[in-house]
Amino acid sequence: MPNLEHPAYPAADLLHLEGLVPCRESQVSTLLSIFGERQHFSFPSIFIYGHTSSGKTYVMKTLLTTLQLPHVFVNCVEYFTSRLLLEEILIQLQSCSPGAEQTSPVHCDTLNDFVRLFKQAVASQELQDQTLYIVLDRAEQLREMEANILPAFLRLQELTDRNVTVILLSEIVWELFRPNMGCFEPFTMYFPDYSIGHLQKILSQNHPPEYSADFYAAYINILLGVFYMVCRDLKELRHLAALNFAKYCEPVVRGEANERDTRKLWKNIEPHLKKAMQTVYLREISSSQWERLQHDGGEPGQLKGLSAHTHVELPYYSKFLLIAAYLASYNPVRTDKRFFLKHHGKIRKTNFMKKHEKTSNHLLGPKPFPLDRLLAILYSIVDNRVAPTANIFSQIILQTDSRQH
């Protein structure tokens, strides 16, 4: 019996949709209930959140495409300013309109322009008779835009007086997303992480046609037994499954074991899966390099330029704070104007040096410096505008405490 049922959509389409979104039938059923029939007004805004690789983007794309619902899908990382975002929505709306031959360039400088152009774009009878969905992926980037952008999207249905629903996809919870001045509260929906049973079911669907489904399911079971505690990312697990399956099949290909000889297959693949544990998420070697490494029987650290776990990435501002502290402690104050100002004027050359300056500053060791000087150097070496927030000062305190201990 199918899990997805809705009187507004054909049963064949719902059955096909159910096969495309395994282990997400409950979330899709909830969304269909919220959407209602095509011509009905839906909820003005929906906020969907969950960890990475929990199926948010895939489910929304598959749902809207399979049921042929008019929609616009925009990634807020790719269109990172309000102008780029609004113009991209209007450009995609042109392709949604029936009879649109070619999209023309759109210029939208303000939110008022967007509302006016949006009404014009959905003026066709087909778009007026059904709900239009605007999906904003990676919606946490909206917080970096103008303060009126997020509240406007949450109330776009009211502002335009059109049948439109805005869907925000994010990896953070709504409590961290909500603007300080308050806004219209969207309908919130959570996508939980896939359980090990869900991952087993999803990954087993990709079995090669030359092998039986049970054989590939046994391989996925072994793979998850090794990696599930350190990696829940579906994309990463799918990559690891494709990368190591050839090695798992080697005893069967050579005729040393059959597909049901699980013990021999496990003994053959176990050392290679342990090697693969060193490169989870890092992507420091390509698939071809990994296959060559397996064939030669080498270790991942033997590849040139592979740092494995010796490379630690610091937070963005922590790196620049350390650089600024180094520059402030080893350079005299009088050199700041010459090093960190673009237009510092003429520099007077002198033919003499003080006696104590003939020694390298690196040999004398670091000198103390005031906090204001550290922040001034930080602002000059970071390309983007840096606001003196609590995050910056907390990192300074943490670095100071670590040096004292």
Image (cartoon, rainbow, N blue to C red):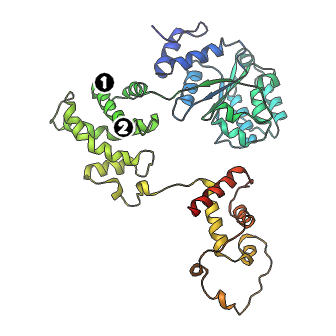
- Name the element at disc 1: helix
Give 398 or 143, whichever is nearer the viewer. 398
**Residue bearing the label numbered 2:** 242
Residue beneath the point at 78% across and 20% down: 162
- Sequence-wise, which precedes: disc 2 or disc 1? 1
Say what amino acid the circle numbered 1 marks.
Answer: Ala
Secondary structure of residue under mark 2: helix
Which residue position holds label 1? 213
Give the alpha-carbon distance from disc 2 to disc 1, as whole Å: 15 Å
Residue at 28% in and 24% down: 214
Q: Amino acid at mark 2?
A: Ala
> Residue 212's x, y, as percent?
27, 25
25 or 160: which is nearer to us?
A: 25
Task: Classify 10 Å Cα crowding around label 2: few (below 14), some (14-19), many (20 and above).
Answer: some
The quarter in which the C terminus is drawn is: bottom right
- x 31%, y 54%: residue: 299
Q: Nearer the viewer, residue 403 or 86?
A: 403
CB contact under 8 Å: marks 2 and 1: no
**Measured along the vertical axis of the image, is residue 65 above or below residue 148?**
above
Q: Is residue 336 left or right of residue 66?
A: right
Q: Is residue 89 left or right of residue 63?
A: right
Position of 325 with respect to 58 (left or right) is right
- Seen as rendered, the residue at the extreme bottom is 351
Give the left or right position of residue 269, taking residue 380 as reference.
left
Q: Going 52% across and 29% down the picture, which residue do you hit? A: 55
Residue 36 lies in quadrant: top right
